[in-house]
Image (cartoon, rainbow, N blue to C red):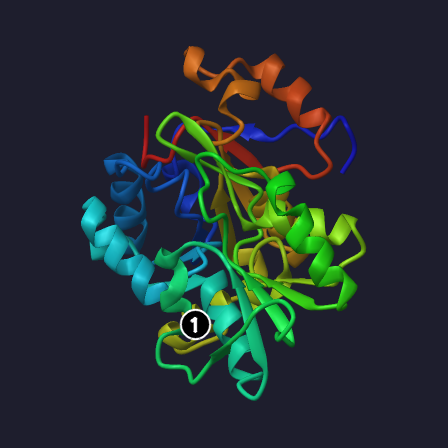
Amino acid sequence: MTASYRPALVEGLQPLAGRYDLVLCDVWGVLHNGIKAYEAASEALTRFRDGGGRVVLVSNAPRPGSAVGTQLDGFGVPRTAYDAIVTSGDLTRLAIEERLDKVVHHIGPPRDMPIYQGLDVRFGSIEEADYVVCSGFDDDERETADDYRERLGAMLARRLWMVCANPDLVVERGNTIIPCAGAIAQAYEEMGGDVYYAGKPYAPIYERAVAVASKLNGREIAKERVLAIGDAIRTDIAGAAGFGIDSLLIARGIHAEELRAHQGPLISQHVQDWVDLQPVKPQAITDALSWAA
């Protein structure tokens, strides 16, 4: 797309809904901010499903989809808002299942350990490991990727392959930006390490999500009838573009400050100037996910 490409500024999902049979919706930053759920977003997805559409939540959460569903229950996101959940954690589990004869070194907090639930996994130190799974920071409120340089150096010396269970660089927790596993993986890659990113923006997670929805529908859903919704250019919008589907960018997410989304209604020219600078462009932009204004 050229710099002159102008995405539509829309007021809610309703103006777009008739064009699509399937919505692949991001979770963190769209349905909730890590502290509270956005009721209007859940309502929008429920309305889309009421009209005959399918909704698959596609998340870079480093946990199985079932665990994310339980978390959403706690936030008060109704099950009527979606048909299924596919996560980077699900794809990470597939990578682990293929290596049950290997020793894994885990980087990440205890809350991410459900990724191994039910799997006969052997854990070990960097010196003992055959590969590494990185799900996040031990303390994401205080640490940065620089705190892992020594650890990454030891991994690089052994040429250990890393599975990044959450390719996001950052997420918004309330009003605070929190680093994710993607930041550690990026640092390792920059040092020369070999990294497999299990989620967005890479094709396997989209292929799995569309396959799940197509099975529920009893027929294959064409890409031109699929809309991705998310708040991050690097993962949600780039992933949609790479997979060949349309996308709707949520302005009140991690790009809110750049888009001045918290200052009032989106200003068309400012949004366009920002879009012109981005490597990929969404088909449409809305302030926050809702059904209609």
Q: Does residue 105 appear to the left or right of 21 in the view shown?
A: right
Q: From the viewer's perspective, is residue 69 above or below residue 246?
A: below
Q: Residue at x 49, y 42 (%)?
A: 230
Q: Out of 200 and 79, give the one closest to the viewer.
A: 200
Query: Which residue is disc 1 drawn over?
Result: 212
Q: Out of 198 and 51, give the one closest to the viewer.
A: 198
* Residue 181 image point, x, y percent: 55, 50
Q: Is residue 129 visible?
A: yes
Q: Total number of numbered labels? A: 1
Q: Residues within 10 Å of mark 1 (few under 14, many from 20)?
A: some
- Look at the image and tell me in which quarter the N terminus lies: top right
Q: From the viewer's perspective, is residue 182 above or below residue 285?
A: below
Q: Residue at x 61, y 53 (%)?
A: 201
* Residue 188 image point, x, y percent: 71, 52
- Residue 183 quadrant: top right
Q: Does residue 28 appear to the left or right of 241 in the view shown?
A: left
- Look at the image and tell me in which quarter the C terminus lies: top left
- Secondary element under disc 1, as helix, strand or loop, is helix
* Residue 56 image point, x, y percent: 39, 59
Q: Out of 252 and 18, give the one closest to the viewer.
A: 252
Q: Residue at x 39, y 47 (%)?
A: 27
Q: Is residue 54 visible?
A: no
Q: From the viewer's perspective, is residue 64 above or below residue 271?
A: below
Q: Does residue 213 appear to the left or right of 7 in the view shown?
A: left
Q: Amino acid at mark 1?
A: Val
* Residue 83 image point, x, y percent: 31, 63
Q: Does residue 175 appear to the left or right of 125 in the view shown?
A: left
Q: Residue at x 54, y 35 (%)?
A: 284
Looking at the image, which residue sits at the far bottom? 101
